[in-house]
Image: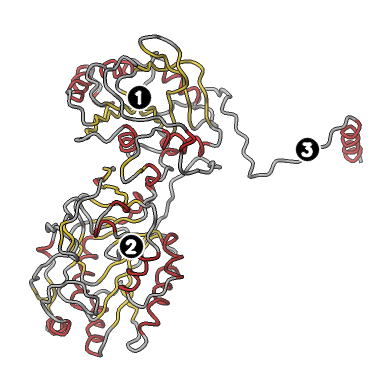
Amino acid sequence: MWRLILVFLVALGGFWFGKTPQPKKSKSSIVVHPETDFPIVEHKSFVVVIYAHNQALWCERALRSIFEQDYDHYRVVLVDDGSTDRTVEKANQFIVDNNQADKVILIHNETRIGEPASLYRAIDGCLDREIIIPLNAKDWFSSPLALNRFNVAYQNPDVWMSFAQSIDYPSYEIAKATQTSYYAALFKQIRLADLYQNGHFTSSLDAYLTPLIQMSGGRIRHLSEPLAFCNLASPVKMEITHTGFSECEYEYKPLADFPKPRIGTKADILVFSFDRPLQLYACLESIQRYMSGFENLTVLYRASSDEFVSGYNKLKNAFPLVQFVAQSMDDYKHDFKPNILKIVFDSPSQYILFGVDDIVVKDFVDLKFCMDQMEKTGAYGFYLRFGKHINFCYQSGQPQKLPPSQSLSGGIYAWDIQTGENDWGFANSLDMTLFRKEQIKEPFTQLKYKTPNSLEYNLAVNATPKKAMGLYFERSKLVNIPMNIVGRTGNPHMNYLSTDELLTKFNQGLKIDIEPLYKVENRSPHFDYIPEFVLR
C-alpha cells in the first residue's frame, strides 16, 4: 500500500512543479564519461611507434625521451622509411649503447612509403589491447612522466583514444592537441581499402584519424597538459598532409563495445572438374599435402561418358575425406548453379576457396592465417596464385606489371585491385581465391551461369567491386598447368595430351608427379609444364 502512495506522490510532485517523469534510455543508447579519472589498478601496455625519415639529427633525442620514462610497460617500434642519412644506423647504435635492444623492434622500408603506411605496417603486428602512441623521430616526450599520464587516462574503460597538447620547438608555445594515442584494436577496424587513394596508400593522417574518432563514439580523452615536443626546427620537409576531418570519404559507425577479434572463422574448398580425373588427382594430392586450416573439401564434377565416371569413382576411393558431387550428364547446364548454391551457402563456414582441376598447390599454406589477414584488413579476396614474381599474363601472352603493393605482416602484400592490369585486375578469379561468403552470396544467387567459365565471366562483368583490396603472399602458392582444354573457351593451352589420352594413363595406374613442382618458379599463374607420370 505504501508503495502506491509513494508513486502517487512522485507523480503529483512532477505535475505540481511542471515536470514530467523522464523515459528510461533505450539499451542502444551509449553514455560515456571519458573525462572521469579512475584509480590505477593496472599498468597498461604501450607501443611507441616512431616514424623516421632522414632524422639522424634528432632520432636520439626521441629515443632518449622514451628510455627515460618513469614507466616500464612499454615497447618501441621504430620504422625507418627509406632514410638516406644513416638514421637507422644511428638509432640502432643509440639503442645498443643504452642496452634497450630488448625493448625496440626496427622496421626498415627500402623505399619511402609515407607515415600512414608505415604506421599501418607497425600496428599490424601489435596486440589488440596495446595502446599505440605515434611519435615522429623529430619529436620527443616532454616529461619522464608522459607514459604515466597516459596510463592514468586509460584506466577509464570509456577511454579508447586520447589527444594531448604539445609544445612547439623552438618557440616553446603551447600547440593544439596533436599528440594522439589509441588502442591497436580500434585502428585495426579501419578497412585497408579506405586508406588507399588512386592505387596508393593515402598521405593524409585524417584518413585514419577520422575513422578512429567516429568509431570511438565519444570515448576520447582530451589531456590538457602538453606531453610531447613538436619539433618545427627539423630541416626535413614532411610530405604527409593533414587535410581536415571533413574530407574523410567514408563514415564509420560508433562501436557499441570494445572491438573483439572474430573467432571460429572457417573455410571450405570447392574444386571444379570436367573429364579430368588424372589432373584432379594431382590437385587433390597437393591440397592434401600442402594446405591446412579448412573444413570441407568438395569436388563438383562432370563426366561426359561412363569411362570418365569410372575414373572419378577411383578418385573417391583414393580420397575418402573429399565430398564428390556429380553433375547430370544430360542436364548439367541447369544443375550447376543449384549445386553451387547448396555446396557454398548451406555450409556454416564463413569463407570459400575456389579451385579448378588443373591446379597444383606447390607450397605450404594455412587458410586460417589467410582468413585472419582478411579479417584484419577487410580485403575482398586472398589470391594464392599471385606473388611478387608474377609479371607475365599467359592468356594475353604479354608482360604485366606488378601493381603498387603494401607490405603487411607475415610476408603478405596488399594491392588495390582496380590498379592491376590483366591478371592483377581480375578480382573474381576462381583459381584458388579465398572469398567471404557473405560478400559473394548476392551475385552468386542473382546472376545466370551454367559453367565455371560463365560464372567467372558474369562475375567479371556484373560483380567486380568498385573499391577492393587483394592480398597475396610474396611467393605464389600454386601453378595452373593448362595441358588441354575441355570447352570452347578460346583460352590458350599447351595442347599436350587430350582428356582421353590422360584418362588412359590414369587407368594404367599413373599420376602426375607433383614433387618437382614444389616451390617451382613461375612468371605467370598458368605455367607451361610437361609433367612426369609415375605410379600411384
Looking at marks 3 and 1 on the same chain, the residue that comes earlier in the sequence is marked by: 3
Residue at mark 2 to residue at mark 1: CA–CA distance: 40 Å
Q: Residues within 10 Å of mark 1 (few under 14, many from 20)?
A: many
Looking at marks 2 and 1 on the same chain, the residue that comes earlier in the sequence is marked by: 1
Q: Which mark is residue 22?
A: 3
Q: Quadrant of residue 405?
A: top left
* Residue at horizontal 24 percent and vertical 72 percent from the top: 357
Q: Residues within 10 Å of mark 2 (few under 14, many from 20)?
A: many
Q: Quadrant of residue 499?
A: bottom left
Q: Which mark is residue 135?
A: 1
In which quadrant is the N terminus drawn? top right
Where residue 282 sits: x, y (%)? 18, 71
Where residue 271 sits: x, y (%)? 29, 70
Query: Which residue is nearer to you in this view: 204 or 219?
Result: 204
Q: Is residue 217 left or right of residue 372?
A: right
Query: Which residue is nearer to you in this view: 464 or 50?
Result: 464
Residue at mark 3 to residue at mark 1: CA–CA distance: 46 Å
Q: Amino acid at mark 2?
A: Asn
Residue for badge 2: 428
